[in-house]
Image (cartoon, grey):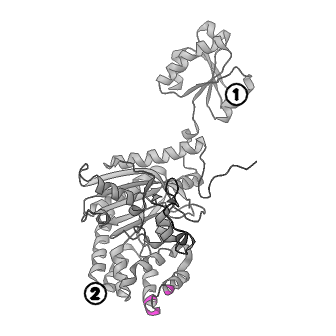
Amino acid sequence: MQKPTIPKGTRDFLPLEMAKRNYIFRTISDVFKLYGFEQIETPAMENLSTLLGKYGEEGDKLLFKILNSGDFLSKVTREELLSDTSIKLTNKISEKGLRYDLTVPFARFVVQHRNEISFPFKRYQIQPVWRADRPQKGRYREFFQCDADMVGSDSLLNEVELIQIINEVYSRFGIRVCIKMNNRKILSGIAEMIGEAGKITDITVAIDKLDKIGIEKVNEELSSKGISENAISLLQPVLQMKGSNFEKISVLRNLLADSPTGLKGIEEVEFILKKADALSLCSELEVDLTLARGLNYYTGAIFEVKALDVEIGSISGGGRYDNLTGIFGLPDISGVGISFGADRIFDVLNQLDLYPKELTESTKVLFVNFGENETDYCLPIIQQLRKEGISSELYPENAKMKKQMGYADNKKIPYVIIAGENEIKENKVTLKHMGSGKQQLLSREELLKILR
């Protein structure tokens, strides 16, 4: 018999894990709503024409493509089937793909529904995304993103607000983080400075891997992309720049003095830093010039969040994208957003044991089943408890007491209610505290008072 399995890079979640995940989603959505964001949803699959070309060459390779319905080979010739051009074949047999992120579908949504929404539009979205990546610790092929974006406003106050949202979310979780910030205009200025303005995409894709593969491998990748040794040499001081945020800004202003684009990026970063400094954030905010975020659609500020007490990749990321909706026929709509990686946050909270203790309680009270008469007595009490918002269960069968108590233990149910012949005569119940073993004979009113 074949052993049941799930695809690599995906996971099942047991009830306790789901309680933890829902805590994450609830906390993040509460903060989003606090800042005036409204919730939307988009389909799991999008037309490939919507997705392709928006994430760069590397991102396109990670798209899960869906075979056309029915006979997907009906329009394919034998020559095309046997040819080595898999891209051309894919275009004929697949028109749809699973979404890679929530930002590109959101851009499509904004364009499609532009007459039904008001600008500036602030939306949040909590849904799964899929990437055909190599599974490893903290990296999955199916994972949830929790995104907040605002479109239709160029104001840098939106970036400041995103920093506040990040700070608030992680404060509520109790996770110490560093918010790393850079600007794509600065990166473009650096590419100009080293004489490789045309290779900005190759440069950003390579240096974005600095944390993962180290500076030597990054330099090798830059060289393999045709970037000159002189340019790579000029890039080194930038990659290794140290000092405070404003010290880095000062050095950059000298380095990029001849780049209007670079100077504009510096001006934007400085504005955000000054506003954030006045907010007394509990999270560290660091200008990191090696932060590139390899996605092509970012045009201004870019953010990444690192947990300080756990070895794991970034747990949030985002930035400014000035022209994403233009691809779908709606130019001049600027947007900025942040994405929280719920699955990585789940792992961090597990490792640091930061979940609220009450999450382990799925049911608060279990009623022991002694038979039909006792059940008839208990059902109205259970109904009353549930009306009061107290989660209650009746064991479904008249099983041995040991089995019913074992069920309560396995589910970590803190209270068991016993209502046998003696309790029924007195119109009371016995409440057993599973932790201490203490038992109390109580009226319904006394029971409600304790359980509330």
Looking at the image, the residue that sits furthest to the top is: 425
Q: Which residue: 55% across, 63% down?
A: 312
The answer to whether 18 appears left or right of 126 in the picture is: right
Amino acid identity at mark 2: Asp
Horizontal and vertical percent for residue 218?
52, 81
Q: Is residue 118 above or below residue 273?
A: above
Q: Which residue is mark 1?
A: 405
In the foreground, 108 or 391:
108
Horizontal and vertical percent for residue 56?
43, 71
- Element type where label 1 sits in the image: helix
Q: Is residue 65 above or below residue 228?
A: above
Q: Main secondary structure of the magenta part?
A: helix
Looking at the image, the residue that sits furthest to the bottom is: 230
Based on the picture, tell me whether residue 265 belongs to the magenta stretch: no
* Circle 2/circle 1 CB separation < 8 Å: no
Would you identify the image quadrant in which residue 149 lies? bottom left
The answer to whether 438 appears left or right of 52 in the picture is: right
Q: Which residue: 54% across, 49% down?
A: 354
Based on the picture, tell me whether residue 227 belongs to the magenta stretch: yes
Q: Which residues are magenta?
A: 223-232
Q: Which residue is mark 2?
A: 258
